[in-house]
Amino acid sequence: MPNIAWIDEQHAAGALAEIYRTYLAEHPDRNGVAGILKCFSQRPDFLELVIKFSNLLHFSDGHLTRRTKEMIATLVSGLNHCPY
């Protein structure tokens, strides 16, 4: 159970619903929007910035490939017992 009151996909409206639709269209392999993003659902304007920043920082190739970054993130999350 989250400690932050977030808005799930089925209850999203307006700008938030559009952000969720775009996110899910860009990630067809996912069942829903990740909880770590839903934490920002009360502020759709900020959520949009978080997604853009995350894509730029974490999910673009640079010194490390996206695959390598995701492997590191998965390892760190496992070590921290984090579900994200």
Image: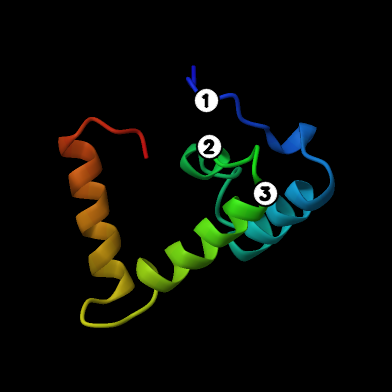
Question: Of the residues under marks 3 and 2, which one precedes in the sequence?
Answer: 2
Residue 18 drawn at (x, y percent): 77, 55
Q: Nearer the viewer, residue 46 or 54?
A: 46
Q: Is residue 81 left or right of residue 34?
A: left
Kindly state the secondary structure of the residue where label 1 is placed.
loop
Give the spatial CA distance, label 2 vs label 1. Answer: 6 Å
Q: Quadrant of residue 65?
A: bottom left
Which residue matches tag 2?
39
Look at the numbered discs 2 and 1 and tell me whether their residues touch, using CB distance below 8 Å: yes
Which residue matches tag 1?
4
Q: Residue at x 61, y 30 (%)?
A: 6
Considering every residue shown, the one lying at the far right of the view is: 14
Three-letter code, disc 3: Pro
Residue 17 drawn at (x, y percent): 77, 48
Question: Of the residues under marks 2 and 1, which one precedes in the sequence?
Answer: 1
Give the spatial CA distance, label 1 vs label 3. Answer: 15 Å
Q: How many marks?
A: 3
Q: Is residue 17 left or right of residue 49?
A: right
Kindly state the secondary structure of the residue where label 3 is placed.
helix
Res 16 label:
none
Which residue matches tag 3?
44
Q: Quadrant of residue 26?
A: bottom right
